[in-house]
Amino acid sequence: MAQYRSVFKDETKLDINYVPYNLPHRELELRLLMEFFSFMLQSPEKMAQRVMVTGDVGTGKTVLSQCFGANVTSGASKRGINVRYIHVNCREYRGSLFLILQHTVSVFHPNFPRRGYSAEELLRTLTQILDEENAYIILTLDEFESLVDREGSEAVYKLTRLQELRQNKPQRLSLICILRNLKAIEKLDASTRSTLQSNIIRLEKYSKQQLIDILANRVSLAFKPLAVPEDAVSLIAELAFSEGGNARFGIELLWRAGKYANAENSETVMPECVRKAVSSIIPIMRKSDLALLGFHEKLFLLSIARIFKESQKACVSLTEAEQTYAVVSEEFGISPISHTQLWKYLRNLSALGIVKAEVSTGVSRGRSTAIYLLGIPAQELEKELMNLLEKKLA
Amino acid sequence: MNIEDVFSSRLRMKILKILVRVGELNVSEIARRLNVNYVTTSEHLKVLEDEGILLHKMFGRIRLYRLNEPSPKAKAVQNIIDTWEHANKH
């Protein structure tokens, strides 16, 4: 039997949750973030900060914030200051302030009860805990749009104006809000918006050369020496650049190409491995988007995928999708949900860029909605959704 | 209270085992795990707290109980439960 060889020395360095020590081409933004929060290392009780980080998918918003979190907590701990960095993906908590606060409280008290009180009570509990532990938190609200969509101004107002209810007491809660663009916060009322908008860090798309640097950095951490030739890195950078300068996509592709090289028992990741990997990949942002969809949302998307898989059509109508969804619901033994809710799901799927929904007013009566599937093979999408649904049911 | 009175109750022993295992819990959750009502649970918790083995913290209406770690009695309880459960595993 042939000996197993691997091109990787540590593939965890390509994991979506890995936070590198340095961030190529985001040094300035990292310094800026440290600057905004420099008070945390001197007199944290005197102020609280709010920063917004914006940028497209894969521009490094999450990793920038996490890297900053690691730096600031280690700096504070050296000075004996109890600073906690808490990173919450709002979409994972369905945009609910209650669930977000519950997660935050659970960092301090993991068995804190899950029901029986309101979000306001939780916020009071959180401040009590912080006062008792003399702790300060930087709460990062990733995918902030989700919180704004679900809770509107009220929730954001509560978070940002917390201190007004506790005059002359140490300021304990700072916020970092991560979102794709600032349009989402236009929905907030003017006073809430004004509490947020003072510090904005905009992350521009990575250029191809910047992507090459980022990938080369990860190659040195994750692969054995000389395992990934320059032309393979350059090809991945090109592909990631064409995906909107998406570094996350590039890193996922790098990992997958490594897997193809291992499967072929090759000592190097050749461009052909990259090509094979890209033909099989659902971009990671879509994959993580899929995982975060609700159960019925997944069923509805599964229905859409199945219609596209069975037919050669370019688009399907919402009516067809609803009919297939009814069948899929039956297959999973649950009652289908209403048309209005499905319409909301469709808008969300469209906002995520998984499908495109177009409302057209035809020559005959009424309006109809056409659904297009973007850039994901229907078969792959079906497979991915079935995996997720089966996991959920198990 | 005498040691035999404190440890003579099966429910009190179960409360101690639960808290040694999970660290900290609210009254309703302890009651749910013991399958007894809130009032009974509260009474047993009070006995253990009066003995200095447990302490509680209030967060609004939520009361969280845990072992009073600095107390020698709590340390002794933790030791006996850990030793017992470890010995039973091997």
Image (cartoon, rainbow, N blue to C red):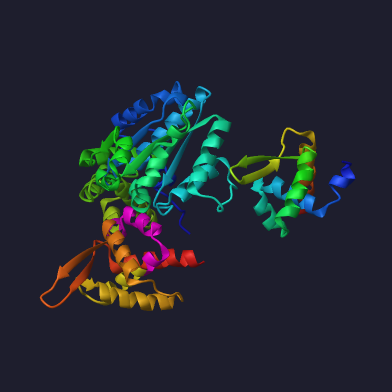
Q: Residue furthest left?
A: A363
Left or right: A277 with respect to B3? left
Q: Position of residue A379 (x, y in %)?
A: 31, 69
Left or right relative to A76: residue A292: left
State yes or no: residue B58 in magenta.
Answer: no
Residue A72 seen: yes
| Image quadrant occupied by the N terminus of chain B | top right
Q: Which residues are magenta?
A: A277-299
Q: Of residues B46 and A381, which is closer to you in this image?
A: B46
Residue visible at 31% across and 58% down in the picture? A281
Q: How far across and down, in percent of the image, does residue A380 sit?
A: 33, 66
Is the residue A341 above or below the residue A326 in the image? Answer: above
- Asked if residue A223 shows in the view, the reply is no
Would you say residue A285 sits in the magenta stretch?
A: yes
Residue A199 vs residue A165, the one in the foreground = A165
Majority secondary structure in the magenta region: helix
Which percent across, then down, holds residue A298?
A: 38, 65
Left or right, residue A111 beside residue A307: right
Residue at point 38% right, 46% down? A154
Image quadrant in which you'd find residue A42: top left
Numbered disc total:
0
Q: Position of residue A369 (x, y in %)?
A: 21, 70
Foreground residue among A213 and A134: A134
Determine the image quadrant of residue A386: bottom left
Q: Is residue B82 above or below residue A308?
A: above
**Residue sitting at 19 percent across and 67 percent down?**
A359
